[in-house]
């Protein structure tokens, strides 16, 4: 009965999205006034992200007795993230150069002002600022300020410290495990507000953009969605099958409710806690999930890579100042570095785009105004692609490290071992073969 109730919750999200679009088209001014509903829901989710990441990483790292194992998982994950970001970058460049988007559009003073505002947001994004920004002011400020990368650093330090404590750290790990359950229970309560948040978010964006903006910019939107689809089905799908013998469509169906939640909120952060729980339930070991998923949210931004490449070429074409191949590569590599840590934040891709252009080609910044109107819709595809990429990455890293139970995954994906949808916490995650056979592993 409880599982049926959560089923109705996600049906309500679909209805809310449709209702929001309708209100935005019929009563644009009312739609724009409903924006705080969407903002409030995403803010509630983001409020929970830091404690969830902290508990997940500490439990994942702290349950491994040798730090080298954590380093191996992290090294494999970061190496994979770098390769996939490069592939996504290349696909975005190829499609962007092929369709030559942006021709025939005209800039207005209002659009120029929008572009200047976004450039101001992203103007501080350079490599040194990014690296220094990973260090929190105090041990607890990472939680109070909601900085994902700072939380990641503090959690890793705490996890390694608990490793060094040996058996004396077991009670602390047990306590953090109880805190994690509390945090996930709070999140399960917040999730019931998802239909309201989805309704407000969709009504606001449709009310602000209207049909005309979508029509005139439809080509770049369509091309971006198709490119993301090609990347997911043509790159991630074959890799997942070749490495882990897992069918991509089955995995995406397993994560269907999470994709729906992302579609409604335009933020992949809203589905992060459930991705962690579902990957553990699927058969990936807790340490691999605890390290790969939170790290992927900052470093595995396949959708953002595609967006930045195509959006840059779009702006250059629209302003009549096309970029040479060398300029394309150097500018976009900078943007990929600057975008780390921006995953899950609605509009962060737009600020990164404007900030990158301000640093390398200031003459193109005004053109960002052309894409402001549809960025929210492109943000949907960005977040969905990032999420799919992180799900696939978790299974791949688990396979490479021998900590993925393929038989368990087959049972789960076939529906014979269903995930309890009433809570985003997997109450009794399986112990993958590697964890049972490896004496170095000591599950919490």
Image: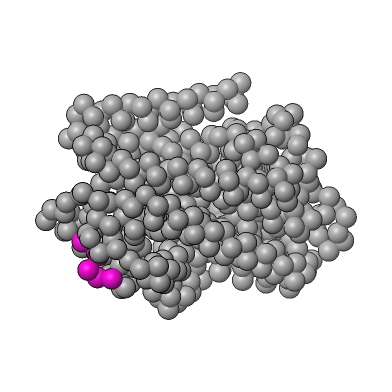
Q: Dividing the image into 4 quarters, which one contains the N terminus?
A: top right
The percent coordinates of residue 356 (x first, y second) are 34, 68
The percent coordinates of residue 58 (x first, y second) are 64, 61
Q: 299 and 180: which one is in front?
A: 299
The image shows residue 4, relative to residue 233, as above or below, that is: above
Query: Image point 64% across, 40% down: which residue?
Result: 248
Residue 23 shown in magenta = no
Query: Image point 54% across, 28% down: which residue?
Result: 6
| Helix, strand or loop: magenta stretch | helix
Answer yes or no: is residue 388 visible.
no
Query: Image point 82% across, 54% down: which residue?
Result: 434
The image shows residue 8, relative to residue 307, as above or below, that is: above
Hey, which residue is sitting farthest left in the picture? 109
The percent coordinates of residue 177 (x first, y second) are 66, 52
So how many labels did they put on this image? 0
Q: 222 and 69: which one is in front?
A: 222
The percent coordinates of residue 378 (x first, y second) are 37, 46
Bounds of the magenta segment: 361-366
Q: Dividing the image into 4 quarters, which one contains the C terminus?
A: bottom right
Query: Image point 40% across, 46% down: which residue?
Result: 224
Q: 421 and 99: which one is in front?
A: 99
Q: 45 and 240: which one is in front?
A: 240
Answer yes or no: is residue 218 visible.
yes
The image shows residue 134, relative to residue 238, as above or below, that is: below
Colour setting = one colour
The image shows residue 241, relative to residue 18, as above or below, that is: below
Task: Tell me: 414 left or right of 121.
Answer: right
């Amino acid at each position: 009965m409880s599982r049926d109730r959560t089923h109705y919750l996600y049906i309500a999200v679909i209805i809310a999205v449709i209702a929001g679009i309708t209100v935005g088209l019929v009563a644009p001014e009312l739609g724009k006034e409903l924006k705080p509903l969407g903002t409030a829901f995403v803010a509630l989710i983001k409020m929970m992200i830091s404690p969830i990441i902290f508990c997940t990483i500490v439990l994942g790292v702290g349950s491994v007795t040798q730090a080298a194992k954590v380093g191996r998982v992290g090294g494999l994950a970061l190496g994979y993230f770098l390769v996939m970001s490069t592939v996504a970058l290349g696909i975005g460049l190829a499609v962007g150069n092929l369709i030559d988007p942006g021709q025939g559009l005209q800039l207005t003073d209002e659009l120029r002002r929008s572009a200047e505002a976004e450039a101001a947001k992203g103007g501080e994004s350079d490599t040194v600022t990014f690296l220094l920004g990973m260090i929190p002011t105090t041990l607890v400020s990472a939680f109070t300020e909601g900085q994902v990368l700072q939380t990641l650093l503090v959690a890793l330090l705490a996890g390694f410290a608990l490793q060094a404590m040996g058996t004396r750290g077991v009670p602390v790990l047990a306590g953090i495990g109880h805190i994690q359950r509390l945090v996930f229970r709070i999140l399960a309560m917040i999730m019931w507000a998802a239909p309201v948040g989805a309704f407000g978010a969709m009504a606001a964006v449709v009310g602000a953009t209207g049909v005309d903006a979508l029509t005139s910019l439809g080509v770049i939107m369509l091309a971006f969605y198709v490119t993301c689809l090609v990347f997911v089905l043509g790159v991630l799908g074959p890799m997942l099958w070749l490495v882990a013998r897992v069918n991509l469509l089955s995995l995406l169906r397993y994560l269907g409710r999470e994709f729906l939640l992302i579609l409604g909120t335009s933020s992949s952060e809203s589905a992060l806690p459930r991705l962690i729980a579902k990957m553990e339930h699927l058969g990936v070991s807790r340490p691999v999930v605890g390290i790969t998923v939170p790290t992927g949210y900052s470093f595995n931004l396949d959708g953002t890579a595609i967006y930045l490449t195509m959006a840059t070429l779009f702006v250059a074409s629209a302003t009549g100042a096309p970029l040479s191949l060398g300029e394309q590569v150097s500018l976009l590599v900078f943007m990929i570095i600057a975008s780390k840590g921006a995953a899950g934040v609605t509009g962060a891709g737009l600020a990164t785009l404007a900030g990158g252009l301000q640093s390398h080609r200031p003459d193109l910044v005004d053109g960002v105004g052309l894409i402001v109107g549809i960025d929210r819709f492109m943000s949907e595809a960005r977040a969905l692609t990032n999420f799919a990429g992180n799900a696939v990455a978790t299974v791949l890293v688990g396979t490479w490290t021998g900590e993925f139970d393929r038989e368990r995954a087959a049972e789960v994906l076939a529906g014979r071992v269903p995930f309890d949808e009433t809570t985003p916490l997997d109450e009794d995650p399986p112990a993958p073969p590697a964890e049972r056979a490896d004496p170095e592993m000591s599950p919490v």
